[in-house]
Amino acid sequence: MEKIGAVLVIGGGIAGIQSALDLAESGYKVYVTEKTTGIGGVMAQLDKTFPTNDCSMCILSPKLVEAGRHPNIELLINANILKLDGEAGNFKLNILRKALFINSEKCTGCGICGQECPVESIDIYNEHMVINSAAFVKYPQSVPLVFSINKDMCIGCGICQAVCKAHAVEYFQQDEEININVGAIILAPGFDEFDPAPLQVYGYGKYPNVVSSIEFERILSASGPYSGMVLRPSDGDIPEKVAFLQCIGSRDVHHAKPYCSSVCCMYTAKEAVIAKEHQHQVNPTIFSMDIRAYGKDFDKYIIRAQDEYGIRYIRSRISSIEENPRNNNLILNYESEDGSLISEEYNMVVLSVGLNPPDDAIKLSKIFGFELNEYNFCKTDHFTPSKTSKSGIFVCGAFAAPKDIPESVIQASASAAHANILLHSARNSLVTKKVYPPEINVEGQAPRIGIFVCHCGTNIGGYVDVPSVVEYAKNLENVEYAEDNLYTCSADTQIKIVETIKEHNLNRVIVASCTPRTHEPLFQETIREAGLNPYLFEMANIRDQCSWVHMHVPIAATDKSKDLVRMAVSKANKIEPLQRTILDMNHNVLVIGGGISGLSAALGFAEQGFMTYLVEKTTELGGHAKNIHASIEGNNVQEFLSNIIEKANKNENLKIFLESEIDTIEGFVGNFETKLKSSENKENDEGTLEHGIIVVATGGEQYQPTEYLYSKDPRVVTQIDFEKMLFESKFDEKVNKIVMIQCIGSRNEKNPYCSRVCCAEAIKNSIKLKDLYPEKEVIVLFRDIRTYGLKEKYYREARSKGVMFLRFEEDLPPELEKEGENLVIHVDSPNIGKVDLELDLLVLSVGIHPPYESNEKMAPMLKVPLNDDKFFLEAHVKLRPVDFATAGIFVCGLAHSPRSIDESIMQANAVVSRASTYLSKDEIEAEGIIATVDISKCSGCGLCIETCAYNAITMDEEKMVVEINSGLCKGCGACVSSCRGLAIDLLGYTDEEIYLVINEFK
Amino acid sequence: MEDTEKTEEIQVIAPTDKVTDENWEPKIIAFLCNWCSYAGADLAGVSRIQYPPNVRVVRVPCSGRINPLFILKSLQVGWDSVLVSGCHPGDCHYISGNYYARRKFSVLDDLFEFMGIDKGRVNFSWVSAAEGAAFANIIEKVTEKTRKLGPNRLFKEL
């Protein structure tokens, strides 16, 4: 069977976009279907993201634009899948593209139709809190930026058709069926928010000041209904007392939502913090059962929310809300932890709604033939967490289980890795590589500038006197040609630009129109077609930053347009062609660490045919997993481990180095050279390994407790010891009373992070014990039970089997005392006060630590950073969770942060896909806009080396001058403005160019 | 620093009979980083938020690219005030560029104070890609402030 080098991604949220970008960059044609009219998903609706409070749109929109303009990605918006045929490697799909009633080829996104449309329609993006028109775009930054008509609301008045200068309105457009052929399918349909309306007890939909968390997110957004002011819907007052109610539609057996939604604890903390930041009068209170801050740096965020922002946490689950009809305030009655009944009045209530499977989950499973789990999320296996039950169909994001953005992005890349492994033989077979005419050498030529000024229908022309701008431009220095266009971006104008360049021998081109952020690549492509270097191009933004914001002052807007064009001409007179450096790409991979993460990653590369070197410092593969018998779900870890080790040993593309460590690493992406040494510090005779990629999978360590008489009394053990007793039938049956203590070596002053796996581990072992010996007594002493996601089921199972859970506060930890030969533990619990528990066995749930010493040694060697806790720090917490800022180096598993086996495998898979975006190429093209150094001016002070976030600058110790690696430079220019000797300049934004623009003051 | 005392001081240093030119409109040069502030300015446009037409934008990749000399040069050639805007601290597309920018500008601020240059002519802000209204608001404020300060003759006279 012929394999097809194309992939279909279902869903254009952040997960789908990440999968699509990974695969498009790895040599596959990618189709993305999106059921709404724009990609971006829920992330586009968010104001900020935890735990860094990054602006969601700021980090998302570059990805949207990249997906929108990628030559190998085809976005099919407003589309549904009708039918699937074929099998893994070769699927045939029938897709319905519903009519937009606006021709997306012709629509320029100018928005005049929406402005003139007389019909009011609801705005789904703003969660119905804002009025939109029937001719609409999903949101202003939407990709693709095309309008559509909501036919349910449209009255057919014809105004939009009359005002659309692009003639894009097509009232009689029909739905269209298309057929595509792909090798693999990635499901990323996301989730639906739980709808709290049917739960009448909270008055959602009835009381105006009860809103859902996603509505509150829009309220917080600067582009939301109240422009970022925190106001309550009933009267527009600033709510001083805001209550957040957790677990609405989560951990709720009565409403068939028994699982934990994983993200609500954190997004609520974020919403509370941001609300307080926006309006200092707001005092948030969060009602929750547990605080599940299990991710990297999450606990620190919660601590800050409490200590710095004064967010109040109350451990209680609110069962109903009443409204005070006089002031629309809301009365909450709740039982505090010690059992007393309290009634409080709040100005506003936010329901932290859970994540549901998407409403079309069942339909999708039927069309595609994959299985769903008991909650209607996509069913996956513990050891293949991104594969569905059907071969060739993979899954990522919240559709596999509720998860946050970084976990979704990780899984997006993981599912892309599976597609890579399946289809690598068909790589590069369907991608289009555009051939451009040879570049005209313009060196030494006097600038001959051509200027195209856009009317953008009436968007510019309605406010700016475009013809006068053209006349003005004609008289500027070295301007050979100037004209105006109705739409400079339209397809026919592109042809005209190419012809004009040839006809007038233009060697610099300026377009005065909209924003370069969206349109520069298009025009750069056009001038390339005319044989010009793409950097011989400038833009003047006379729409988004001129005509649209000065609509009432046309003369001033025209003057400003002239200034902006003059400034562009001034720069265009100096710009030079830039070359993108081409670097060779070595296709070998070095994986450091032979645990489950390292093994999974190494196999992912080897199975694609890439030579992989796996370096392990101990005598055998397997890492920490050697001590784990089963997952909480009951999967056999040892069987999986021996299988994967056998596979690794057999794979001829995989070379394993045991008892070896890294001695030195030199080089950069595509060109690394590594020397190994044996663990006893002996010289390794392997010589130098050459490779293009590095994967850090160096793992973590178990905390060695010093508390609770551990190692002094044999009756005190760790969960790992206990697991061994249970699974290897070494349990002493005389032991009747077992106590477990959580958070040993985690969430304390020294190690402020949560180790993430210990709650599930304790519950797993408790259930195992109860299954073996139902009469034995187990008490788990905890601070929060963090069985996030679908693991919540086992927390419930443990309780139903009689495992007891007792909470303690951080500052009142349980105390162990030896009374004669007996062990007694004193607990002061907020639930029941002080109790003394006799016990036969104390099990400590010890945390995961980074291997401090080796991480401190490895990080400078790789030139990558560690975080405060000494785990490796990724390039971006949200959107680049397994990349380092330094290109070509990746991280997975416990080296990144504590995580379970399935999560480590997912990360290892993700690394495979991220690295494949490099490995799929024979050479990599660096950016043209990069820093260069004039060594005659460089004093070798090294300040720029410190400044560079990408480790692109090194010192030539012999000449005492710096060198900039053009492959690593990202073109930010931080080094340029830090250079005291003015030895560094940024190509494309040189000092000279910027001074010329500044000099254009008139 | 739009206190009137300083404004007078400038007029003392740069006495000229053309200061109260009736047609005078402030001209402001704005250096915006590509990823946040420039995107925020675009969003103001997409949202059709109106602000005074006195600003001319220079796009740079990152606020870290902005050399303090750009600011001095701008004042020297006659721009009435300068606005520098980057991503919010922590949001930098290039990881840390805006922190470098922030440090440089705080030093520059001190330098202005030392030199007796009116600080109100140089403005720093952080605008995200979602803050179209905030961008418009800043332009509004900077324009008003500059209008009060009057034309920038200081460097010209020097």
Image: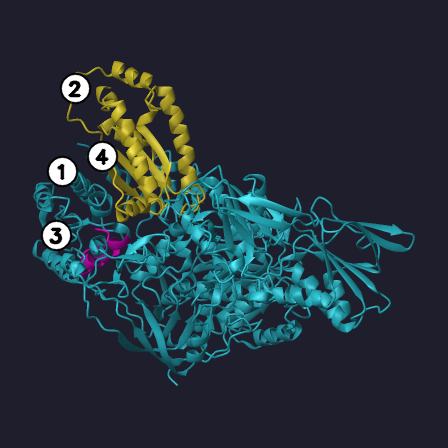
Chain colours: A cyan, B yellow
Name the element at disc 3: loop
Name the element at disc 1: helix
Q: Is residue A276 magenta?
A: no
**Separation of marks 1 and 3 at Cα, in angstroms:** 30 Å
The mark closer to the camera, 3 or 2, is 2
**Separation of marks 3 and 2 at Cα, in angstroms:** 43 Å
Residue of label 3? A506
Q: Position of residue A395 (x, y in %)?
A: 47, 70
The reply to whether dot 2 and dot 4 touch (C-beta < 8 Å) is no
Q: Which residues are magenta?
A: A518-537
Residue of label 4? B54
Q: What main secondary structure does the magenta stretch of the protein show?
A: helix
Same chain, marks 1 and 4? no
Q: Position of residue B120 (x, y in %)?
A: 33, 26
The mark closer to the camera, 1 or 3, is 1
**Which of the two discs, 2 and 4, labels the residue nearer the N terminus?**
2
Q: Residue furthest bottom?
A: A1
Residue of label 1? A555
Q: Nearer the viewer, residue A518 or A352?
A: A352
Residue of label 2? B18
Instruction: Classify mark 3: residues with Cα within 10 Å, few (<14), some (14-19) or many (20+).
Output: many
Name the quadrant containing residue A126.
Answer: bottom left
**Which of the two discs, 1 and 3, labels the residue nearer the N terminus?**
3
Name the element at disc 4: loop
Say what amino acid the circle numbered 1 marks. Answer: Ile
Q: Position of residue A718 (x, y in %)?
A: 75, 59
- Residue under mark 1: which chain is it in? A
Q: Nearer the viewer, residue A260 or A887?
A: A260
Instruction: Classify mark 1: residues with Cα within 10 Å, few (<14), some (14-19) or many (20+).
Output: some
**Separation of marks 4 and 3 at Cα, in angstroms:** 32 Å
